[in-house]
Amino acid sequence: MIDIAVMAVWGLVFIVLIVKFFQSIRLVSTQTAHIVERLGRYRKTLDAGFHALMPFIDKVTFVQDLREEAIDVPPQECFTGDEVQVSVDGVIYIQVMDPVKASYGITDYRFAAVQLAKTTTRSVIGTLDLDRTFEERGIISAKVVEVLDEAGASWGIRVLRYEIKNITPPDTVRVAMEKQVRAEREKRAIMATSEGEKQSRINRSEGEKMELINRSEGEKQRRINEAEGKAQEILALAEATAGSITKMAQVVMSKGGPQALKLEVSEQFIDALKSLENSKIILPANVAQYDGWVDNLGLNRMLDPPQKSDPQASPDP
């Protein structure tokens, strides 16, 4: 029985030695840091690659991920500068820069970063009115990053950015904001409609103005053309009348011209008398005495001018 117990003890010791031997061999992956302690004190940091430790003396106490990490900031209630309660949540993006400080500088840098982000967000939102909280997200994020960066220097971490996901006001405030937005949209729609109608009326009046101007210009040109046409007509008639008078004068001065003119006048007189049938016109009593009319008008003297006396001619016997 004693031999069996001794063999069991040695077997157990051998197994422990084998386990410790394998534990002393470390394969560290990329972007990972292992913190090694020797007898409870910090010894070194293992980077990516193969490493062998001293069994029973060296121990890996912390394993830090050096990649960028996104941490959710749960929703929290904040009061704005105008005493309106809103719910705010976000996301922090951090990265471990010093594995030793991240292991020994703080117990849990993730929890600390979230708490500091929440308190900073509350303090920044407390200085802003409700309307500005939706517009100044960049200011809130920049302030949170600034505060976390100052604290992260002693924690061995770096805060890359902080993004606000949601800012949720109470239902009553949200309904009032929706009404305000709807009213602003209706106001802009009414203004746009009025501007369109105004521009339409302006365009219509400008069109009517141009139409009236064009019509007046056309009427003016038409009257000018008519006046020019009448002037040309009168000038043509005058020229024709002057030509006819000239020709008549030439005919009168020619041989047999006076007798032909007298005959023409007589025919026109007879035609005029024919046209007086069934007409009520006051005429002289001697209307049929054509020769007397002609003498009174002086046509005979004009058509038969007196012959000049020949001084050599002898007088009638």
Image (cartoon, helix red, strand yellow):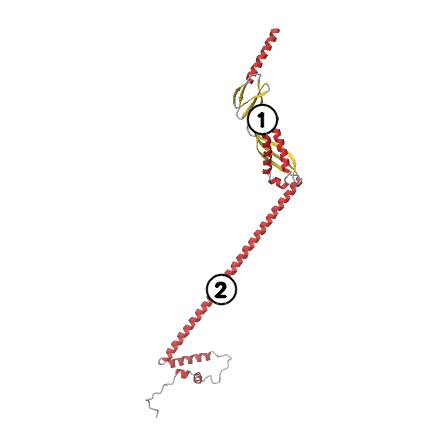
State which quadrant residue 14 falls in: top right
Outermost residue to the bottom = 317
Q: Residue at 62% across / 45% down in the picture?
A: 182
Residue beneath label 2, please?
220
Question: Residue drawn at (62%, 29%), measured in percent from left and top?
Answer: 112
Residue at the location (63% across, 44% down)?
Answer: 180
Q: Is residue 308 above or below residue 89?
A: below
Q: CA distance from mark 1 to mark 2?
A: 98 Å
Q: Tell me the element at label 2.
A: helix
Marked residue nearer the N-terminal end (1 or 2): 1
Quadrant where the image shows the C terminus = bottom left
253 or 118: nearer the viewer? 118
Location of the N terminus (image quadrant): top right
Residue at point 41% right, 74% down? Answer: 242
Query: Mark 1 — residue?
Result: 101
Q: Position of residue 280 (x, y in %)?
A: 51, 80
| Near-viewer residue (220 or 50) | 50
The kind of residue tagged 1 is: Lys
Indicate left or right for 243 with 100 as reference: left
Residue sitting nearer the eye, 184 or 103 = 103
**Front tag of 1 and 2:** 1
